[in-house]
Amino acid sequence: MGNKRLKTCLAGLCLTLILSGCSVVPSSKTVFTTAETPSADATTAIDARSLLQEAVKTTIEGHPDDKDDSNAQFWYTGYVSNSIGDRKTTSMYEGILIRPMEAYLVNGRMAGIPFSYYRWEDHFYMKKGDVWFRASEDEVLPYDPFRGFLDWLPLMEEAQKLPDQEVLSIPADVIQVRISGKEWIEKSTSPLFEELKGKLKGDPSLGNVLDNTVVKTTLWIGKKDRYIYQYSTWIVMPLPGGGYFDQETFFRFYKFGDPGINSRISPPEEVEKWVTQFEEKIKAGELKDLPEEQPVTDEE
């Protein structure tokens, strides 16, 4: 397979993982062995589609019997790691989400470069250094760890129920899907895979690489409240000529309904004020003494 096609494949996989939320990277020589696969007596085959739908709806919107939407706001933290050969990069994320409206703030570090991303419904801003800039939905990634979750629905028909575990002392059902990269692309409803689906039909070498690509995703769903408390996705793709591309994504969600969240994120009017100040300084030729403001403080 040519370098151009390989790059297209890798770019599609990486972008999808970043947008849908996936976790940590092992070494470039990592492979999944049979020892890493849960034994038959430790797992149960289930159709987990309805469970995933319920969990996504509950986590995003809160419980139907809640009198308000306070439980639909929470903290999250996570990372995405990639390695190809001896090269490895890790991006870290932590933030606050307020639902059901689109409101969240992310503080992160990509390839060692810190950034902040703020969205409040149709207001979009990026922070570089000490300065907030106006942005648009098309110019930046959404940095929403729940984006694309329902793309996994078609793959949950043949999931595995692993032994129960606890996440932050909360009992959770553990659901896992392990498939080939080819099956992932063919069955996923994500629009990011449309181009790759077309290439698969006329490119046997691409199909061979994806046949030997392993995709494993695991979700931890609260047994009682049905919140998604944690998930990870691990991909190992063989590279022509030897070696592997590895990507692991991990996110954890916690403090659902934290009443302190509202005091930690400023309304868009405040961020707009900081952006306007910067724009005025640019017009006046002044770039010094800019206020170092942030719409959220570190969690205590």
Image: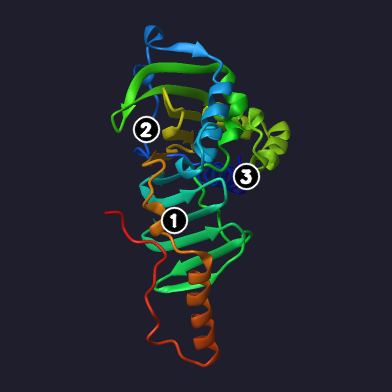
Residue at image location 35% in from the left, 47% down from the top: 86
Q: Quadrant of the N terminus?
A: top right
Answer whether residue 215 is visible to the viewer in this image.
yes
Residue on which the image places disc 1: 106
Q: Which residue is mark 2?
A: 30
Residue 77 relative to residue 159: left or right: left
Labels 3 and 1: the sequence-earlier one: 3
On screen, residue 169 above or below 22: above
Q: Secondary structure at mark 2?
A: loop
Residue 241 vs residue 213, the one in the foreground: 213
Q: Rounded to the nearest whole Å, what is the CA distance between mark 3 and mark 1? A: 33 Å
* Cβ–Cβ under 8 Å for marks 3 and 1: no
Q: Quadrant of residue 30?
A: top left
Q: Disc 1 to disc 2, how far (Cα)?
A: 31 Å
Q: Position of residue 286 (x, y in %)?
A: 46, 91
Count neighbours of disc 2 (C-alpha within 10 A) and say few if under 14, some if 14 to 19, many if 20 or more.
some
Mark 3 to mark 2 CA distance (whole Å): 23 Å
Q: Which badge, 1 or 2, comes first in the chain's sequence?
A: 2
Look at the numbered discs 3 and 2 and tell me whether their residues touch, using CB distance below 8 Å.
no
Q: Which residue bears the numbered disc 3?
A: 5
- Judge left or right: residue 34 versus residue 179: left
Q: Give the x, y percent position of residue 229.
A: 40, 34
Up-down relation of residue 289 to residue 47 (above or below): below
Q: Is residue 240 visible?
A: no
What label does residue 288 carry, if any?
none
Q: Given the image, on which type of amino acid does mark 2 rest?
A: Thr
Amino acid at the residue labelled 1: Val
Colour scheme of the rendered structure: rainbow
Please state which of the two labelled residues, at mark 1 or mark 2, is closer to the viewer: 1
**10 Å neighbourhood of mark 3: few (<14), some, or many (≥20)?**
some
